[in-house]
Image (cartoon, rainbow, N blue to C red):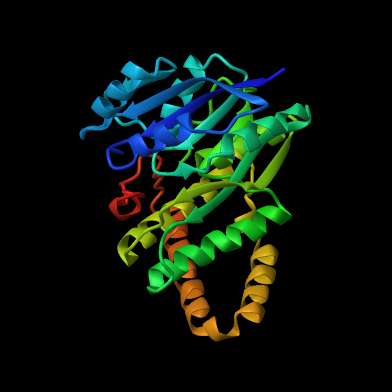
Amino acid sequence: MKISCSIGIIVHNEEANILHLLEAISAQRLSQVEIREVIVVSSASTDDTDDIVRRYAADHPQVKLLTQAKREGKASAINLFLQEASEEILVVVSGDVIPSKDTIEILVSAFEDPTIGATGGRPVPVNPHDSFIGYAVNLLWRLHHHMALISPKLGEVIAFRKVMESIPCESAVDEASIEAIIKSRGLKLKYLPKAIIQNKGPENIKDFIKQRRRIQNGHLWLQKKQNYKVASQDKSILFNLLKRELRDNPRDIIRIMGVIALEVYCRILGSWDFFIRGKNPFIWEISHSTKALKK
């Protein structure tokens, strides 16, 4: 018997990627898994995102568009998906990624094991390595991969059992909030690195700082409000991974140290926002250079 799932795509002004993403979902190679519905939740998009989805849905009846008149944050959009989804296995997909052809099959078929509560794949950035920011993006996602092998850390596309009615609307790190709820129900997280997800990191230092600053703030909020600490906040894991990176790539020592310094700076800014300014960026400013995954 196949495992059925509902897919939720969360978007805001994703006209550059949404058609590619919908086509990638339709082209998934499925054996043990069935995609019953694809629900696109568009949060106050002002570009052509909604029209692109409507045109696609006209020829693909399993695709449904839900719109929010006002941006209320990604977590709020996920909650709308939770209300509307018909299946017990859910997959949340960021609107600016492209899953490989086997990603949904790999993530969802893992739920044959009743102890598994959530699964995630491996995000692989398309950014070239030749610039410093491109190198930084690739290094951080490489560290994310090695970290997730030690302690599962899920992101970009996350599949999970529908064991909650909602997630906290104020969360700026929605995947981590889902992880926290799943683990609180006594279920396991599973990282599946063969489930590849193409994404695009920032192309300039301004967007890089903006993104990393928000994530640090969101992880501090998560620790306080949901009593959950993600693996990237574990200094011992980070230290050991960076030590191995320096050992394996000694020629890159200057760039690695530069990325470390930049990440520390971003974490200081995020901590300042959280502890001093009392800021919670759950409705965040878009980093435009992370869009247009395919050109």
**150 w.r.t. 14: above or below:** below
| Residue located at (51% from left, 26% from top) | 7
The spot of residue 253 in percent (x, y) is 54, 83
The spot of residue 289 in percent (x, y) is 30, 55
- Front in this rendered view, residue 229 or 89: 89
| Residue located at (39% from left, 19% from top) | 60
* Residue that extends furthest to the left in the rendered view of this protein: 47
| Residue located at (64% from left, 44% from top) | 228
**217 w.r.t. 107: above or below:** below
Q: Quadrant where the N terminus lies?
A: top right
**132 w.r.t. 186: above or below:** below
Q: Can residue 152 be seen by looking at this rendering?
A: yes
Q: Can residue 169 be seen by looking at this rendering?
A: no
Which quadrant would residue 146 be assigned to in this image? bottom right
The spot of residue 219 in percent (x, y) is 53, 49
Which quadrant would residue 5 be assigned to in this image? top right
The spot of residue 108 in percent (x, y) is 64, 31
**231 w.r.t. 98: above or below:** below
Residue 63 appears left or right of 188: left
- Front in this rendered view, residue 270 or 247: 247
| Residue located at (36% from left, 34% from top) | 11
